[in-house]
Amino acid sequence: QHKILKESDTVDSDAIHCRWRHWSVSDYLREFKNQSITPLQIVNSLITIIQSHSQSQSDKQDKQKNNPYILPLTKTQIQQLRQYATESTQRYASKSPMKGQLDGIPITVKDDLDVKGYTTTKGTSFINKTQPATNDCTSVARLRLQGVIIIGKNNQHEIGCGTTGYNMTYGTPRNPYSHHLNHYTGGSSSGPAGAVASGLVPFAIGTDGGGSVRIPAALCGVIGIKPTYNRIPDEFKSAISIAHTGILAGSISDAAIAYHITAGSREREYTNDKEDEHEHPKNNELKFRPLRVSASQPPVDMSMYMNTSKTSESDDASLLKNIKIGIYRPHIQDAQTSIISATNKAIQFYKSKGAQIIDIELPHLQQIHLAHSITILSEMRSAMSTYYTTGRSTSPGRKQGQSQNLVQTQSSPEIQISLELAKTLSAQDYLAAQRIRNYAMTCIETLFRTQIDILLSPATAQVAPLIGRDVLESGESNLKQTAALMKFIIHGNFTGIPGIVFPIAYYGDDNGEISSSSSSSKDSKEDDDAKGLPISLQLQAAHWNEDLLFHVANIGEQGLLSKGWKKPKGCYVDLFEQARASSSLEVVVDK
């Protein structure tokens, strides 16, 4: 079983000198143990928020226009939540043994991962809509053993095939940092990013096949970690060679805790098909799966991060001594001016901490991007093939049970375009893409083996995009925008190396100044709208080197935001405050 990070081994959020910060796992545990706040109070506050917004969503138009939380959460089970929260509260009150080290901590899970008792609809109106999962996926099962309370399933970009977070069925989540709630969260893990950034949960579980954890985390100003391929060994039916389970969190420490619990092979894994999902099984009742050779991986080691998190000497010029950070400068320059400026300041910061900055080259990126697109589209199209022919109609004008094409009748135009494009790809195209993948893996492995320890880049080439007034009904297919959001993330999915993103500036601040070239009234209006949107950095490392990523990112988190984290201006809920104020449980929405 996993050795869980001790609370005393994690960086205390109070050590990060800032005017505001997200409440952390350590904060929750402290409040629970002191009985200042109970898990039941937290859950009741969340239920109040969920129900108040659910009641206001009478139709699709309301979903898209009126709800500031649109809609990080799409599914929840109120009675079950109260039961789990009551049991956790009783354990704290009676000082009984805790269920686990995260007893009572609320989290959410993206809708393309299985949570027992919930349907896994992948953001659609038709996939598995009447078939709840009978088991938790591995990551959820491991977290549940430590006592977390699953608040519900998160919204996402439909079938995970998009970078904005647009969803025609459940509504499009808004970026909590958007002053007027008119910017995307990013996708496809839009719900997890929105839930963490708006204060609903300290961390959430997402998936990443083409930046789908890192892009929304970066745009919403939270932490996003995509580990090495299969490091968190969930099984995927779509994009099987590309998809990774990842974590979105309000701090590096919370991301590290969640990663440490969920990562590692399934050598000693229990199955919970006959266990009640909220009961901790006895040791002699665990049922172990045999370790598959292909699942073999090195043990999870967090010693470097844990040693760094204990020091508060963020001005130590030797913190990163002997660490080599690679920079591909022409690539970095292909971004918004504010992002280039913030990234260059991050490079100088790491240099001041003792890191050696090395100029490198990443060859044939255009071909690698194309090969990734061919791979992920081919695998998604294969997984969706059954929904082209086996749907059963319940709509007027069709005979009951008559076959219909569910993709064409119930998917957004953007998804239809993507899947139709995938239909034109051949087996030869897919095999050719894998040859390029082999080349990319050889290049990246050689790079880490011979030249660098860390690859540094912006997380995205632009800040969160505006949501056009005319796109909420049917969505948009904007290839230029998609390319800007995915520009720096492809190697992570295609070669399987780990990557982490975290905020380093805010658009319009000293470290994220607005470009002086924005002269037109339209550009000026867009700059005004974008003020305060997060700018994030990405760090990548060799396979299995997540510990190094957390180590370097932790130093950056404490030193790069010189003026501290900023509270979201669009919508944010202080759960601690609302849990204490039982007479006032309204969401704080800044207009």
Image (cartoon, grey):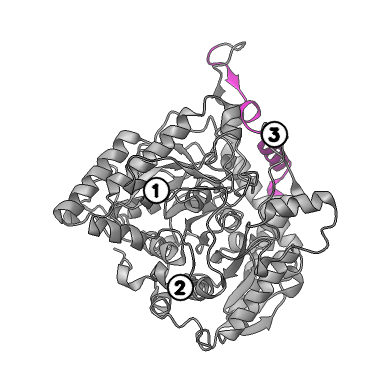
Q: Nearer the viewer, residue 510 or 189?
A: 510
Q: Which mark is residue 547?
A: 2
Q: Magenta includes 412?
A: yes
Residue type for callout 1: Cys
Mark 1 vs 2: CB contact within 8 A: no
Q: Is residue 439 visible?
A: no
> Which class describes the residues within 10 Å of circle 2: few (<14), some (14-19), or many (20+)?
some
The numbered mark, 2 or 3, whose residue comes first in the sequence reads 3
Locate the N terminus and report the quarter of the image it occupies.
Answer: bottom left
> Which class describes the residues within 10 Å of circle 1: few (<14), some (14-19), or many (20+)?
some
Mark 3 vs 1: CB contact within 8 A: no
Residue type for callout 3: Pro
Q: Name the residue: 58% across, 20% down.
A: 403
Please report the bounds of the magenta region as a residue range.
400-428
Q: Name the residue: 15% across, 56% down.
A: 95
Horizontal side, residue 69 vs residue 460: left or right: left
> Which class describes the residues within 10 Å of circle 3: few (<14), some (14-19), or many (20+)?
some
Residue type for callout 2: Asp
Q: Which mark is residue 413?
A: 3
Q: Name the residue: 51% across, 89% down.
A: 318
Q: Quadrant of residue 63?
A: top right
Secondary structure found at label 2: helix
**Residue position marked by numbered label 1 in the rendering:** 137
Q: Nearer the viewer, residue 506 or 556?
A: 506
Q: Between tags 1 and 2, which lies in front?
A: 2
Residue 418 vertical placement versus 459 (above, below): above
Secondary structure found at label 3: helix
Q: CA distance from mark 2 to mark 3?
A: 41 Å
Horizontal side, residue 35 vs residue 588: left or right: left
Q: CA distance from mark 3 to mark 1?
A: 30 Å
